[in-house]
């Protein structure tokens, strides 16, 4: 009996020592982001058996707010921790056709808020329409200016969490003189670097890696996004409908109809329908100047030297939405101390719900944890 009492006492002492040790560690500058990472990873990983964040945090306060963007009102959802403290703030930027009320979006926003962040998820009208335009850029700038005015936001800790095209437009917005001094960090998942190289990869089905072209099969959504974005430069609705309809159906416009199109419509259709590598650059140069200027404006690499924020890039080696080389190119353009770059083998684009073998899934989970830790270590 005495033996069991001593054994129980020793076990209790060991547990208490471990608890004290962990408590002390989690109170350190390294331990705080580690704790937040441990609590956040289960929330963003599908099928994780235990989600302790809900046990140790309060339900976020969620409200709808209006942002003023170029004389228009844009709606956004604001998530706040249930306290009266100041917190770091994140503008959550999505890919095309994903709404702010998407269950995956609201779940992630709530998890971030429970972890101690103010989260703003704005509507991006052009993204919702299925293409990329300057509307989203202006909306993101207005989102940051809105957060900067709030008393519950840490002014030196405002940043972006962006996915796919949302990640890239976040970088472009962060290069803008209006807010670049206000942005401390950007968590960018699967960003593109340059819209011209992304167009080449999407339309020709290849990406350039270490000087050599490698086959790449783009996702249908990526092709549709490019088609809609370029066709938006066609002046008349009738021509836009004709071109987009034929492209979506993988059909050719008859010669008789093609000759009746406006010069802008002809050049855009010829560019989007082309699959000949030898003709690509020539057809690209024939695009309307306004379209070419827009591609330059919405490419993160155009003004990358103006970026002051720390950039954290997570790329998927098997991504079919954005070629993996795009994230690598961005990382190489910045000083090492300003960028953190890491790759996963397969992440089903930006969705952590993988269909990988157990060992591979554990490996990707470890990489995700490293990524989140490095982001949080910059902020917490």
Image (cartoon, grey):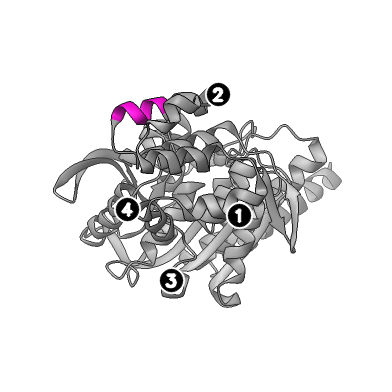
Q: CA distance from mark 4 to mark 3?
A: 15 Å
Task: Please tell me whether the stretch drawn in magenta is mainly helix, strand or loop.
Answer: helix
Say which element carries label 4.
helix
Badge 1: few (under 14), some or many (20 or more) residues near its Cα, within 10 Å? many
Q: CA distance from mark 1 to mark 2?
A: 36 Å
Q: Earlier in the sequence, mark 4 or mark 3?
A: 4
**Relative to 109, 37 lies left or right:** right
Residue 16 x, y percent position in the rendering: 65, 55
Tell whether position 186 is magenta: no
From the viewer's perspective, is the residue at label 3 or at label 1 nearer? 3
Residue placed furthest toward the left: 71
Residue 19 appears anywhere in the view: no
Badge 3: few (under 14), some or many (20 or more) residues near its Cα, within 10 Å? many
Could you tell me if the residues under marks 3 and 2 are in contact, i.e. CB atoms within 8 Å? Answer: no
Say which element carries label 1.
strand
- Which picture quadrant has residue 34? bottom right
Say which element carries label 2.
loop
Please give the residue where the numbered disc 4 appears in the rendered image. 140
Disc marking residue 251: 2
Q: Earlier in the sequence, mark 1 or mark 2?
A: 2
Q: CA distance from mark 1 to mark 4?
A: 21 Å
Please give the residue where the numbered disc 3 appears in the rendered image. 307
The residue located at (55%, 23%) in the rendering is 251
Please give the residue where the numbered disc 1 appears in the rendered image. 314
The region drawn magenta spans: 237-242
From the viewer's perspective, is the residue at label 2 or at label 4 nearer? 2
């Amino acid at each position: 009996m005495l033996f069991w009492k001593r054994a129980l006492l020793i076990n209790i002492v060991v547990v208490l020592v471990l608890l004290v040790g962990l408590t002390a560690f989690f109170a350190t500058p390294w331990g705080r982001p580690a704790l937040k990472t441990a609590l956040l990873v289960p929330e963003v990983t599908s099928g994780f058996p235990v989600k302790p964040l809900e046990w140790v945090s309060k339900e976020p306060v969620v409200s709808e707010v209006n942002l003023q963007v170029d004389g228009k009102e844009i709606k956004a959802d604001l998530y706040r921790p249930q306290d009266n403290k100041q917190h770091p703030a994140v503008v959550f930027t999505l890919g095309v056709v994903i709404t702010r009320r998407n269950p995956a979006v609201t779940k992630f926003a709530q998890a971030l808020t429970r972890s101690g962040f103010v989260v703003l998820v704005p509507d991006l009208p052009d993204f919702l329409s299925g293409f990329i335009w300057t509307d989203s850029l202006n909306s993101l700038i207005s989102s940051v200016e809105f957060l900067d005015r709030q008393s519950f936001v840490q002014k030196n800790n405002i940043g972006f969490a962006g996915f796919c095209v949302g990640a890239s437009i976040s970088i472009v917005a962060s290069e803008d003189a209006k807010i670049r001094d206000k942005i401390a960090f950007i968590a960018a998942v699967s960003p593109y670097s340059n819209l011209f190289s992304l167009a080449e990869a999407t339309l020709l089905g290849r990406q350039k890696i270490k000087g050599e072209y490698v086959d790449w099969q783009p996702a249908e959504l990526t092709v549709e996004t490019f088609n809609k974005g370029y066709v938006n430069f066609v002046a008349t609705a009738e021509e836009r409908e004709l071109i987009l309809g034929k492209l979506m159906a993988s059909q050719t416009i008859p010669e008789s109809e093609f000759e009746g199109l406006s010069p802008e419509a002809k050049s855009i259709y010829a560019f989007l329908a082309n699959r000949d590598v030898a003709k690509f650059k020539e057809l690209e140069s024939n695009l309307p100047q306004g379209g070419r200027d827009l591609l330059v404006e919405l490419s993160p690499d155009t003004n990358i030297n103006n970026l002051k924020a720390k950039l954290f890039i997570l790329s998927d080696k098997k991504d079919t939405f954005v070629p993996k080389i795009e994230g690598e190119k961005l990382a190489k353009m910045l000083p090492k101390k300003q960028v953190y770059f890491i790759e996963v083998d397969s992440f089903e684009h930006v969705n952590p719900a993988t269909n990988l073998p157990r060992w591979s899934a554990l490996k990707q989970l470890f990489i995700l944890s490293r990524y989140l830790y490095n982001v949080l270590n910059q902020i917490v």
